[in-house]
Amino acid sequence: MDLSVLFLLLLAAVATTVNATDHIVGANKGWNPGINYTLWANNQTFYAGDYISFRYKKTEYNVFLVNETGYDNCTIEGALGNWTSGKDFIMLNETERYYFICGTGGCLNGMKVSVVVHPLPTPPMSAIVPRHSSEKSAAPAAARGFRSLLAMSFAFFGLTLCGSVWI
Ligand SMILES: *[C@@H]1O[C@H](CO)[C@@H](O)[C@H](O)[C@H]1NC(C)=O
Ligand SMILES: *[C@@H]1O[C@H](CO)[C@@H](O)[C@H](O)[C@H]1NC(C)=O
Ligand SMILES: *[C@@H]1O[C@H](CO)[C@@H](O)[C@H](O)[C@H]1NC(C)=O
Ligand SMILES: *[C@@H]1O[C@H](CO)[C@@H](O)[C@H](O)[C@H]1NC(C)=O
Ligand SMILES: *[C@@H]1O[C@H](CO)[C@@H](O)[C@H](O)[C@H]1NC(C)=O
Ligand SMILES: *[C@@H]1O[C@H](CO)[C@@H](O)[C@H](O)[C@H]1NC(C)=O
């Protein structure tokens, strides 16, 4: 394999590792009272490694990661995380349901959102890469990049082989 192929491979690997989606909560309406975020969430598909981002007035609102009880009751006791910058990017690391609420009272006016994070779609070439079943439960975001890299490697090897056969 020559250097230009290696370079292309590297580029492809970089391109596939940074393609996580940023889901902006409420789109252009942001994180504010009086919006049904269930409708917003139902219109999105979240994958492990994607970002969810909240944009709001930091003097009025914030973001708390809570469990189902916290979400249902608008309470932050035992919260699993909180963000206050006004423009928070939160990576959805695990394939599970996440619950976010506003901790300044906005939750009671609808500032709550629950999202289900799905495992990464299987890259087409991964059929030839053995997978371990433990990978599914952990679903580490880094695995995406690695799997993509493997897939790309196989694709390039395939192309190179075809090329040499044809020439
Ligand atoms: C938001 O929309 C969902 C889906 O249509 C609905 O079930 C829910 O009751 C709505 N929530 C509020 C607070 O209106
Ligand atoms: C759902 O997504 C489409 C396409 O991105 C957008 O045009 C539409 O406004 C969205 N609907 C809601 C309720 O967010
Ligand atoms: C949450 O609220 C429900 C009623 O809305 C109540 O029955 C339950 O005890 C509350 N849970 C907690 C942990 O406060
Ligand atoms: C949520 O966390 C609170 C506080 O830690 C706890 O009392 C409650 O049982 C938890 N609820 C669920 C559904 O895990
Ligand atoms: C918010 O998170 C920080 C750590 O990031 C923690 O020290 C603090 O107790 C949290 N606040 C609340 C109210 O849970
Ligand atoms: C995901 O992992 C990163 C890095 O460990 C961490 O900063 C972030 O808070 C995590 N996301 C959630 C929702 O816990």
Image (cartoon, rainbow, N blue to C red):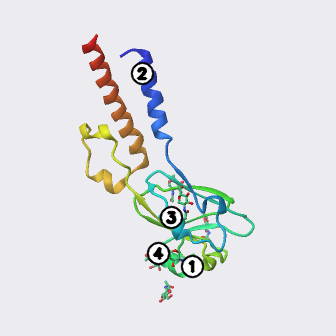
Q: What residue appears at the point 73 percent right and 64 percent down from the top-left corner? A: 57
* Amino acid type indicated by mark 1: Cys
Q: Residues within 10 Å of mark 1 (few under 14, many from 20)?
A: many
Residue 102's x, y, as percent?
A: 62, 71
The residue identified by callout 4 is: 68
**CB atoms at circles 2 and 4 under 8 Å apart?**
no
Residue 93's x, y, as percent?
A: 46, 55
Task: Work out how far the residue at label 1 is from the one at label 2, CA to CA, in angstroms.
Answer: 52 Å
Task: Work out how far the residue at label 3 is from the one at label 2, CA to CA, in angstroms.
Answer: 40 Å
Task: Work out how far the residue at label 1 is from the one at label 3, CA to CA, in angstroms.
Answer: 18 Å
Task: Work out how far the residue at label 1 is from the one at label 4, CA to CA, in angstroms.
Answer: 10 Å
Residue 59's quadrant in the figure?
A: bottom right
The residue identified by callout 2 is: 6
Q: Residues within 10 Å of mark 2 (few under 14, many from 20)?
A: few
The response on whether ligand 4 sits within 8 Å of label 4 is yes
Among numbered discs 3 and 2, the one appearing first in the sequence: 2
Among numbered discs 3 and 4, the one appearing first in the sequence: 3
Q: What residue appears at the point 32 percent right and 54 percent down from the top-left corner? A: 136
Label 3 or label 4, whichever lies nearer to me, is 3
Among numbered discs 2 and 4, the one appearing first in the sequence: 2
